Image: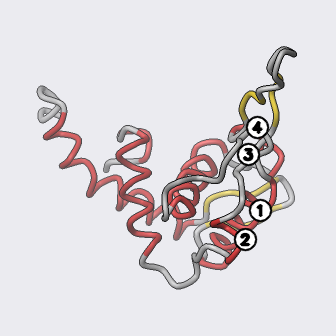
Amino acid sequence: MTTVYDIPPDVLIAKVAGELKQLDSIKAPVWAEFAKTGVHKQMPPKEEDWWYTRAASVMRRVYIDGPVGVQRLRSFYGGKKNRGTKPNQFKRGSGSVTRKLLQQLESAGYIKNTPEGRVISAEGRKFMDSVANSAKAEVVEQIPGLSKY
């Protein structure tokens, strides 16, 4: 069975984002089109459906790193802030975006909250593995010599 670990992240995240876009429980809030994804960014994302891409990425991170909390995910989605003539400094990503995405994924049943942190649920693992399995055909076409696996 193909799992999340067997598929390149960019291919998997794009496929999962497409699947998440079809769900009713995951919708971008009204403020999402104006919000930056962190204090280190100068502008909001230009993509219209960046919310679903970030949701797919968060879901993959929880699958791989879980149990994980909002602070750890903020560190993962952070970056260097340009401070002009002063040296750049690392800043964490937006906590509100991360928190809202985790809450929406919990309401969809793909993530569950435990005392240690958020982990992927059985339904979420099944969803991610099925998307990875369907993405395997695309990966095999893109990378020659991989068909024997």
> As shown in the figure, which amino acid type bears the numbered disc 1?
Arg
Q: Quadrant of residue 42?
A: top right
Question: Which tag, 3 or 1, sits closer to the chain's start?
Answer: 3
Q: Quadrant of residue 54?
A: bottom right
State if disc 2 and disc 3 touch (CB < 8 Å).
Answer: no
Question: Which tag, 1 or 4, sits closer to the chain's start?
Answer: 4
Could you give the CA–CA distance between mark 3 and mark 2, rounded to whole angstroms? 14 Å
Which numbered disc covers residue 99?
Answer: 1
> As shown in the figure, which amino acid type bears the numbered disc 3?
Leu
State if disc 1 and disc 2 touch (CB < 8 Å).
Answer: yes
> As shown in the figure, which amino acid type bears the numbered disc 2?
Gln
Question: Which tag, 4 or 3, sits closer to the chain's start?
Answer: 4
**Circle 2: element type:** helix
Residue on which the image places disc 2: 103
Between label 4 and label 2, give the one nearer the viewer. 4
**Can you give x and y, in whole percent of width and height, for residue 73 in the image?**
73, 45
Q: Tell me if residue 149 comes above or below residue 68 in the rendering.
A: above
Comparing 3 with 52, the one in front is 52
Which numbered disc covers residue 40?
Answer: 4
Comparing 53 with 31, the one in front is 31
Q: Is residue 52 left or right of residue 145?
A: right
Comparing 149 with 61, the one in front is 61
Could you give the CA–CA distance between mark 1 and mark 4, rounded to whole angstroms? 18 Å
**Circle 4: element type:** loop
> As shown in the figure, which amino acid type bears the numbered disc 4?
His
Identity of the residue drawn at 73% across and 37% down: 78
Could you give the CA–CA distance between mark 4 and mark 3, rounded to whole angstroms? 15 Å
Could you give the CA–CA distance between mark 4 and mark 2, rounded to whole angstroms? 24 Å
Which numbered disc covers residue 64?
Answer: none
Could you give the CA–CA distance between mark 2 and mark 1, rounded to whole angstroms? 6 Å
